[in-house]
Amino acid sequence: MANLPIGIVFLSITTILVFLGFFRATLDRMRLTDRSTIIILVLLIIAHLMPNFGINQYLAINLGAIIPLAVLIYLLITTSPNERIRAIAILLATTGFIWVTDNLFLNSTDRFLFNIDPLYLPGIIGGLLAYLTTRSRRSAFIAGTGSIFLLDIIAFLTNLNHHVPSQIIIGGGGIFDAIIINGILAVIIAEIIGEIRERIQRGPARLPNQGGDELE
């Protein structure tokens, strides 16, 4: 167990919790069933065994990363047009925030404010932005996961522009774990904030005219 990647451990625990009926309300908001979620989680565990595919000297992709990318695309295309626009906006805002902090604050240290590991910033920022703007768990997952992909693409374009002889592997190594963890972390953060708000108001949290996950 100690030698297993953190992503596999995280996914295994999440799979068990979903099987036991946890997160049902959250999955309903994202229009996912328990069965489909478990299948996705098992596929993500298997994805850890997938090899890298080299595109050129500057870019490669871990074939396992195609699975979370497919989930992200599915969540985008199965939502309403307005929600899709908001999700993309939150994704871009999260990516921009991470890129700025990475370039301005993390050059001399590997920790961010409050000793937060920057590896988990996309999930934290994505979850916060998604809930504060749309209260959408779906947008939270898209932002937490998609920002990792976009940051890898930005790194690839930067290397290409400066002719840096370094290959960016999208979803490779620990980045794959970051993709998985940040997507789920963003949803958990949005859900926790939502639960706290509901308890404070002593009723279901509703936000008319802002859409959210359309089930809230």
Image: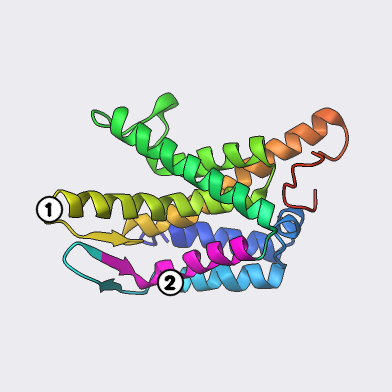
Q: Is residue 68 magenta?
A: yes
Q: Which residue is mark 1?
A: 163
Residue 184 in view: no
Please say if the residues under marks 2 and 1 sit with CB atoms less than 8 Å apart.
Answer: no
Stretch of the chain drawn in magenta: 60-77
Callout 2 crowding tier (Cα within 10 Å): few <14, some 14–19, many ≥20 = some
Q: Secondary structure at mark 2?
A: helix
Q: In the rendered image, which quarter is residue 128 located in? A: top right
Compared with residue 118, is residue 73 higher up or lower down, i.e. above or below? below
Mark carried by residue 6:
none
Compared with residue 53, is residue 14 higher up or lower down, i.e. above or below? above
In this rendering, the count of numbered labels is 2
Left or right: where 139 falls relative to 50: right
- Whole-Å distance between the Cαs marked 2 and 1? 31 Å
Which amino acid type corresponds to the residue marked 2 in the rendered image? Answer: Ala
At 48% from the left and 70% from the top, the residue drawn is 67
Q: Which residue is mark 2?
A: 47
At 28% from the left and 61% from the top, the residue drawn is 169
Q: In the rendered image, which quarter is residue 126 located in? A: top right
Q: Residue 185, percent across and down?
A: 55, 47
